[in-house]
Amino acid sequence: MSTLVNAASREALAATELQLLQATDGASAAEITGLADELFGVAGLLGRESTLRRALADASTDPRSREDLARGLLANRLGARALPVVVEAVRARWSSPSDLVEGLERMGRTALLVQAERAGRLDAVEDELFRLGRIIGSQVDLERLLSDPAADAAGKKAIVDQLVEGKVEPVTLNLVHQLVARPRGRRISEGLEELAELSAKRRERSVAHVKSAMPLSDEQQQRLSRTLQRIYSRPIALHLEVDPEIVGGLLIRVGDEVIDGSITGRLQSLRRDLAD
């Protein structure tokens, strides 16, 4: 999951995202895809080159010096939309060099989600990422292969293509390609869940992960969504999973908060009470 929890890195991320949104203003879908690819490319470069990564993230140096270094190395390799985003990122104060790399990766993903949002396909992308995460997470050997940082990136992308090409949105496919190419220590199912949550945040919604013993009907989903919206005073996106082990009721997780209305959860609570 994301490690950008330090206040300095969060502020740097916010400033860089503002520059990213300016860079996507008036851009075509192809231009946004190109912007994202260039940001992923810079993140990959910094991930490989530790000396450069540390130099561009060194908070003890003057921001203008870091900017000059980035421009000198990257100006001829980046387009007019990507360069200002990278410059903003290296001028910002990150908690660690790895946070700078993760921030640039996040900007590439955000650019693709902006593209889907403007095309009216963000809902579809979010749903596909969530479902694909569940599918891959249920296949141990497949997830192990796709999550292996030492495995050939092109080979992993080819496996993804066999699995989903032609069945998902182009943005979804691009996001998954980038994730398997640079899993950064995450299981792919975890990375896909994080991407689905990032998609939900694009619409200023929270995500409720809901487990039920049986599939919920459309009416039940709508009632649950309205109830959670009243509880949290904001729109809630439902990510649904059927899990017969909970026997009955619902197990709901919103962020770090768990609402356990399952029979299994109530039995566990009863056992704890009896043991006290």
Image (cartoon, helix red, strand yellow):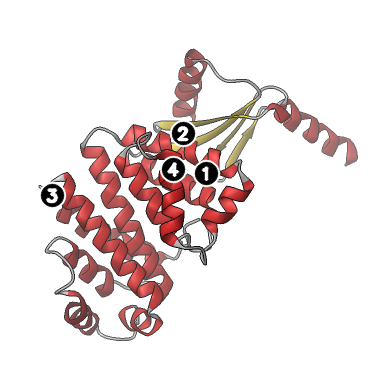
Residue 243, image x, y percentages: 65, 30
Disc 1 marks which amino acid? Gly
Q: What residue type is labelled 2?
A: Tyr
Residue nearer the viewer, 71 or 137:
137
Q: Which amino acid does label 3 sit on?
A: Asp
- Residue 155: give x, y in percent of width and height: 45, 57
* Sequence-first disc among 2 and 4: 4
According to the image, label 3 marks what residue? Answer: 25
Marks 2 and 3, the one that precedes in the sequence: 3
Question: Can residue 207 be seen from the camera position used here?
Answer: yes
Total marks in image = 4
Per the image, label 4 sits on a secondary structure element best described as helix
Q: Which of marks 1 and 3 is nearer the N terminus?
A: 3
Please tell me which of labels 1 and 4 falls first in the chain. Answer: 4
Q: Do the residues labelled 1 and 3 touch (CB within 8 Å)?
A: no
Name the residue tied to disc 4. 162
The secondary structure type at the circle numbered 1 is loop
**Callout in the foreground (1, 4):** 4
Q: Which residue is drawn at 46% across and 49% down?
A: 159
Q: Gap in Å between the C-alphas at discs 1 and 3? A: 31 Å
Q: Residues within 10 Å of mark 3 (few under 14, many from 20)?
A: few
Would you place residue 26 above or below residue 237 in this image?
A: below
In the rendering, which numbered label is found on residue 232? Answer: 2
Disc 1 marks which residue?
A: 255
User: Horizontally, is 11 left or right of 217 in the view?
Assistant: left
Near mark 4 (Cα within 10 A), the count class, few <14, some 14-19 or many ≥20, is: few
The answer to whether residue 82 is above or below residue 22 is: below
